Amino acid sequence: MFDPAYAMIASVIWAFSPIYYGTLMKKLDFLVLNWFRTSMAAAALAVPAAYFGFTWGVSYALLSGVTTLALGDSLFLLAIKDVGASVSAPVVYTYIVFIQLTAGAVGDVVPAANYLSAVMVVFGVFVLSRGGEGRPRAKGVAYALAAALVWTGGQDLISVATGTGANVVTIAFARNFAAALALGVAVFALRRGSWRPVGTSRRELGFFVFIGLSDLVVGSLLYVYSVSLVRIALTVILTSLSPLLTQVFSKALGKESPSIRDLAGGILIVTAVIIAVVG
């Protein structure tokens, strides 16, 4: 397969899954939902991961799982629940620009283009935060920005883990296992809501299993494998198309109705991400 195609397929998967999560969270608590999806993914990857074996580099994947999947994805789900996937997805992908800008903190030179990206991101987030039809969006946008900051701190750990020679399947398992463990503790400690979506058919639950495994197993494996093939810069560019696709899919499927202003905000952020990575 054409090497960049792996990241492109992952971007399509990740564009669709937030839309369905938004629908499911009308019936299921966001922490329970995140616990279910990470537990399913860890279970599906356990045997293959044991086959490929574990190395010391997996420790980075474990830390990435707690930060990006347990904490970051929970904040992202909260944002989706509050303002919808078509608004949350572009905002949360600002983490890519944040990663570029924070490079200066570790001694890297930050290109001038990255500062232009930062201005575009600020403007794009402002556009998306302007709620349509009088609906406030500040809280949901804040959740998405918080998720972006958490992802900023944890995303590079994936690249570090692949750099140690750890197998991509093992890395994906370790991330989901660590996240599921942390989320399980949180769910039991906080005594979250029902573990079964009320009024959900077996067919709908089966579709949730399919979406969850596509998201965290197939999508994650494709992402990690893409990083190992074409490195993180090109992988990030290709997957950054995901939030714009989320807006398009949500409207095409009739799940949400992003306005022209929402689409403009999404385009601004996606463009900013591409400029930041290419620049």
Image (cartoon, helix red, strand yellow):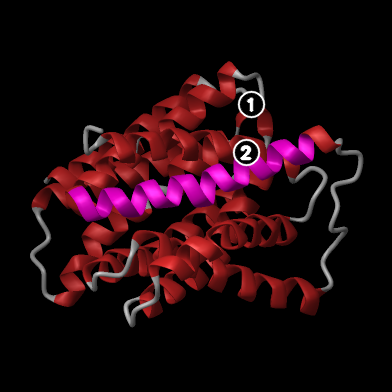
What SS does tag 2 mark? loop
Q: Is residue 279 above or below residue 253?
A: below
Q: Give how far across and how far down residue 76 sits, in percent.
A: 56, 53
User: Who is closer to the viewer here, 83 or 73?
Assistant: 73
User: Who is closer to the viewer here, 255 or 34?
Assistant: 34
Per the rendering, the mark at residue 267 is none
Q: Amino acid at mark 1?
A: Glu
Residue 271 part of the magenta segment: no
Residue drawn 66% across and 25% down? 255
- The chief SS type of the magenta part is helix
Q: Give how far across and how far down residue 3 sits, in percent.
A: 22, 38
Q: Is residue 131 left or right of residue 91?
A: right
Span of residues in magenta = 204-229
Q: Badge 1 local density, few (<14 within 10 Å), some, or many (20+)?
A: some
Q: Is residue 202 left or right of residue 229?
A: right
What is the number of callouts on the image?
Answer: 2
Residue 223 part of the magenta segment: yes
Q: Is residue 23 left or right of residue 6?
A: right
Cα separation between marks 2 and 1: 7 Å
Residue drawn 62% across and 75% down? 182
Disc 2 vs disc 1: Cβ atoms closer than 8 Å?
Answer: yes
Residue designated by label 1: 256
Residue designated by label 2: 84
User: Who is closer to the viewer here, 127 or 75?
Assistant: 75
